[in-house]
Image (cartoon, coloured by chain):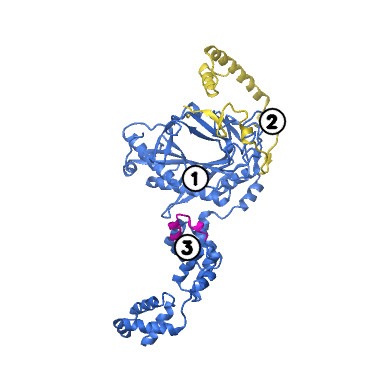
C-alpha cells in the first residue's frame, strides 16, 4: 500500500488550487493510495527489458517548419475572457505565490 | 524602502569567498513560436500574435518548431556541450496568469544540451572557464502589466493586464555549474559571462540578443562561504537582471548584503530577490517554498526529439567562427597592439574596421579613421559609431585622395563631415568646395619667402643645422595658404631654399 497521508493530500490540493474539506482530505488520503497502487501494478507487466516511455506511439521528431500560420485578432483572442482592458486580459493582481 | 545593511565590498572579500551561478534565458528569433505557428514578433499590438495553442484552449496540440530545435543545438555546440541523442519535453506546473495553460512546456531531466563550458575573457585578458550544466528548450510566458496602486510595481497593484504575444516564444535556458574561484572579480566575471553568451547567440544568428527587449535575461545566484571552506553557503537568486551593467551591480550588491547578514551571525535566507535599477539594490521576493513544487512530468502531447549524430554534425558545420577566435585572428591580421585592439573592441567598431579593410583600406588607415574621427563624432551625436552611416568605400576614397596628394588630412576630415551632412561623395565635395592641395611651387615659394622673412631668427637656426625648427616656418606657410598646401612639399622647398639637407 502506497503511503499517502492526509498532509500529502492537503499539499497536493493546495498546489492544484482545490479547496477540500477535512472529510474530503481524510477520504482522499485512502482513495489516492489505492489509485497509486493500482497504477503501479502496470510495472508488473513490464519486464526489465522494457524501457520506460512517456509516449505510447514509437514516434520521434514530429516537427513543424518555421512558417507563420494563422492568428486571432485581439477581439477573437479576448472573446472568452471574463474581463479585459486595452486589448489585454484583465486579471486580479496576484503577488508571487508564497 | 530598503534599509538592509551591507558590508563594503573590500571587507566582504576579506572575509568571504563568493560562489556564483547563472541562468540565462535566450529568446530565439525564429519566425514562429516554439509550439504554434503564430508569429514571434516583438512590439506588435497586444494579443494579435496568438492562436488557440498560445492561449491554452482545450483540446489543442503543440507541434515543435524544427528551426527552434536546430537553433538550440547550435547554442549547445557553441557552448561546447554534448547534444543529447534523445530528449523529451516536460510540463512545469504552476498557476500564474502569464501562462494560460497553467504549465510551461520545458525540459526537465533530459535537456537537449549538457556538460559544456565557455571561456570568458575579463577586461585585462584573463581567461576564466565557466562550466555549463545544461541548455534546455522551453517557451516564454506572456507579459503582465501591473496596474493601479501607488508604485506601479506588483506590490499594491489593483489588477494586472496580460498580453500573450510573448507566450510560446522559443527560449533556451542556459544554466551554469557553480562558479568558484572568481574572488573579488566575481561582479566583473558575471558581466563578462552574460556578455559572452549574448555575443555567441548573436554571432550564431539565433537570437536578436537585445537585452533591452528581454531577448537575453539573466537570473544571478550568489552565495558566500568563509575562505577555506568547501561547502557552499545559502544562495539568493536575483531575478531578471536585464542589462550587462545591472548584472555586475547586482552580484556586487548581493555579495555585500550576504556578507553583512553572515557577519551579524544570521543565516542567509534562500529566496528570490528583485533587482531595482534606480537604487541599485535588491529586495526580498518570496522564499523558496511549496510554490516551487512544479510537479514536472513528461509532456504527453509531444514525442521525443532525437538528434542523430549526422544532424548534429551538419549543424556544427554551419557554425560561424567563435567570437573569441575571430577577435584573435583579426588582431593578428591587422597587427594592432593589445591596447589598440581593446580600444577598438570597446569602441564597438571592430566590424566596421573589418569591412573598411575588406573594402581596400590598410589596417592603420581604417583604425585612424574609425578611432580618430568617427568614434568622436558618434559620441557627440550620441549614437553608435556604426549608426552614423559611414560607408567603408568613403573611407577608402578619402584615404586614396590623401595618399595621392590631392587633399591633405585636414581637408579629408572636412570632406567626411560633408559626406555625413549628405552633400555627396568625397569626389563631389572636393570639387564643390574647391578643395585641393596647392602643388604649384610658385605660390608656395612666395609664401615660404614671406614666412622666412617674418621669422628671421628661425631661418637662421635652420641654416645653423637645427632642422627641426622648420616646423615653425611650415606652420606659417600652411596658415598663409589656408591649409591647402602639401606640408611635406613645403618642408622640402624650405630646406632646399636654405640649402640644408634633412
Closer-to-camera residue (B399/B411):
B411
- For disc 2, the marked residue is A56
Q: Camera-side residue: B230 or B164?
A: B164
Chain B, chosen colour in render: blue
Q: In the rendering, what colour is chain A?
A: yellow
Crowd tier of the residue under label 3, counting other residues whose Cα lies within 10 Å: few below 14, some 14–19, many 20 or above: many
Q: Given the image, what chain letter belongs to the residue carrying mark 2?
A: A
Tell me the chain of label 1. Answer: B
CA separation in Å, label 1 and label 3: 26 Å
Q: Chain of mark 3?
A: B
Pointer 1 with pointer 3, Cβ within 8 A: no
Q: Quadrant of the N terminus of chain B?
A: top left
x, y percent for residue B149 = 44, 30
What type of secondary structure mainly makes up the magenta span?
Answer: helix
Is residue B177 in view from this perspective?
no
> How many residues crowd around disc 2 within 10 Å: few (fewer than 14), some, or many (20 or more)?
few
Question: From what the image shows, is residue B96 above or below residue B336?
Answer: above
Residue B350 shows in the view: yes
Pinpoint residue A73: horizontal percent, then vertical percent.
Answer: 63, 36
Question: What's the distance in space between the residues labelled 3 and 2, CA to CA?
Answer: 62 Å
Q: Residues within 10 Å of mark 1 (few under 14, many from 20)?
A: few
User: Any magenta on residue B388?
Assistant: yes
Q: Are marks 1 and 2 on the same chain?
A: no
- Seen from the viewer's position, the closer of residues B470 and B430 is B430
Precedes in sequence: disc 1 or disc 3: 1
Residue behind mark 1: B212
Q: Which structural element holds mark 1?
A: helix
The dot on residue B432 is none
Q: Which residue is mark 3?
A: B370
- Magenta span: B376-389
Task: For marks 1 and 2, give the CA distance.
Answer: 43 Å
Assess whether residue B144 is covered by the magenta stretch.
no
Amino acid at each position: 500500500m502506497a503511503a499517502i497521508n492526509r498532509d500529502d493530500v492537503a499539499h497536493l490540493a493546495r498546489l492544484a488550487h482545490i479547496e477540500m474539506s477535512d472529510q474530503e482530505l481524510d477520504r482522499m488520503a485512502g482513495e489516492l493510495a489505492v489509485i497509486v497502487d493500482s497504477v503501479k501494478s502496470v510495472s508488473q507487466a513490464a519486464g526489465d527489458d522494457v524501457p520506460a516511455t512517456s509516449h505510447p506511439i514509437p514516434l520521434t521528431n514530429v516537427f513543424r517548419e518555421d512558417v507563420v500560420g494563422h492568428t486571432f485578432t485581439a477581439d477573437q483572442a479576448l472573446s472568452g475572457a471574463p474581463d479585459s482592458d486595452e486589448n489585454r486580459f484583465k486579471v486580479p493582481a496576484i503577488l508571487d505565490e508564497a | 524602502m530598503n534599509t538592509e545593511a551591507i558590508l563594503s565590498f573590500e571587507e566582504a572579500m576579506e572575509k568571504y569567498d563568493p560562489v556564483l551561478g547563472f541562468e540565462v534565458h535566450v529568446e530565439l528569433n525564429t519566425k514562429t513560436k516554439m509550439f504554434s505557428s503564430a508569429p514571434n514578433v516583438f512590439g506588435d499590438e497586444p494579443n494579435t500574435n496568438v492562436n488557440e495553442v498560445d492561449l491554452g484552449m482545450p483540446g489543442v496540440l503543440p507541434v515543435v518548431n524544427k528551426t527552434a530545435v536546430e537553433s538550440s543545438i547550435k547554442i549547445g555546440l557553441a557552448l561546447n556541450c554534448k547534444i543529447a541523442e534523445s530528449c523529451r519535453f516536460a510540463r512545469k506546473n504552476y498557476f500564474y496568469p502569464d501562462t494560460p495553460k497553467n504549465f510551461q512546456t520545458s525540459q526537465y531531466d533530459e535537456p537537449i544540451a549538457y556538460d559544456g563550458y565557455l571561456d570568458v575573457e575579463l577586461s585585462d585578458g584573463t581567461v576564466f572557464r565557466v562550466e555549463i550544466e545544461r541548455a534546455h528548450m522551453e517557451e516564454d510566458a506572456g507579459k503582465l502589466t501591473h496596474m493601479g496602486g501607488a508604485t506601479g510595481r506588483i506590490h499594491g497593484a489593483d489588477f494586472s493586464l496580460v498580453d500573450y504575444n510573448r507566450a510560446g516564444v522559443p527560449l533556451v535556458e542556459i544554466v551554469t555549474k557553480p562558479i568558484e574561484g572568481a574572488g573579488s572579480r566575481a561582479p566583473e566575471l558575471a558581466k563578462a559571462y552574460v556578455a559572452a553568451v549574448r555575443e555567441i547567440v548573436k554571432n550564431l544568428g539565433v537570437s536578436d540578443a537585445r537585452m533591452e527587449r528581454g531577448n537575453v535575461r539573466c537570473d544571478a545566484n550568489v552565495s558566500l562561504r568563509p575562505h577555506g571552506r568547501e561547502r557552499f553557503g545559502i544562495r539568493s537568486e536575483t531575478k531578471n537582471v536585464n542589462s550587462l551593467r545591472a548584472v555586475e551591480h547586482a552580484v556586487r550588491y548581493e555579495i555585500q548584503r550576504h556578507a553583512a547578514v553572515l557577519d551579524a551571525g544570521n543565516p542567509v535566507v534562500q529566496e528570490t530577490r528583485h533587482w531595482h535599477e534606480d537604487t541599485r539594490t535588491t529586495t526580498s521576493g518570496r522564499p523558496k517554498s511549496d510554490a516551487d513544487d512544479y510537479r514536472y512530468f513528461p509532456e504527453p502531447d509531444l514525442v521525443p526529439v532525437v538528434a542523430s549524430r549526422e544532424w548534429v554534425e551538419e549543424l556544427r558545420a554551419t557554425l560561424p567562427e567563435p567570437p573569441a577566435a575571430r577577435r584573435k585572428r583579426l588582431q593578428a591580421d591587422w597587427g594592432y597592439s593589445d591596447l589598440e585592439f581593446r580600444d577598438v573592441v570597446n569602441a564597438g567598431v571592430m566590424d566596421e574596421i573589418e569591412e573598411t579593410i575588406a573594402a581596400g583600406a590598410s589596417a592603420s588607415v581604417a583604425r585612424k579613421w574609425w578611432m580618430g574621427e568617427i568614434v568622436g563624432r558618434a559620441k557627440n551625436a550620441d549614437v553608435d559609431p556604426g549608426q552614423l552611416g559611414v560607408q567603408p568605400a568613403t573611407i577608402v576614397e578619402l584615404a586614396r585622395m590623401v595618399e595621392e596628394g590631392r587633399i591633405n588630412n585636414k581637408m579629408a576630415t572636412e570632406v567626411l563631415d560633408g559626406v555625413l551632412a549628405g552633400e555627396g561623395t568625397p569626389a563631389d565635395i572636393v570639387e564643390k568646395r574647391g578643395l585641393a592641395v596647392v602643388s604649384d611651387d610658385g605660390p608656395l615659394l612666395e609664401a615660404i619667402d614671406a614666412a622666412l622673412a617674418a621669422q628671421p631668427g628661425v631661418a637662421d637656426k635652420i641654416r645653423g643645422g637645427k632642422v627641426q625648427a622648420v616646423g615653425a616656418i611650415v606652420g606659417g606657410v600652411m596658415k598663409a595658404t589656408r591649409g591647402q598646401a602639401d606640408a611635406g612639399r613645403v618642408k622640402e622647398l624650405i630646406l632646399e631654399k636654405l640649402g640644408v639637407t634633412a
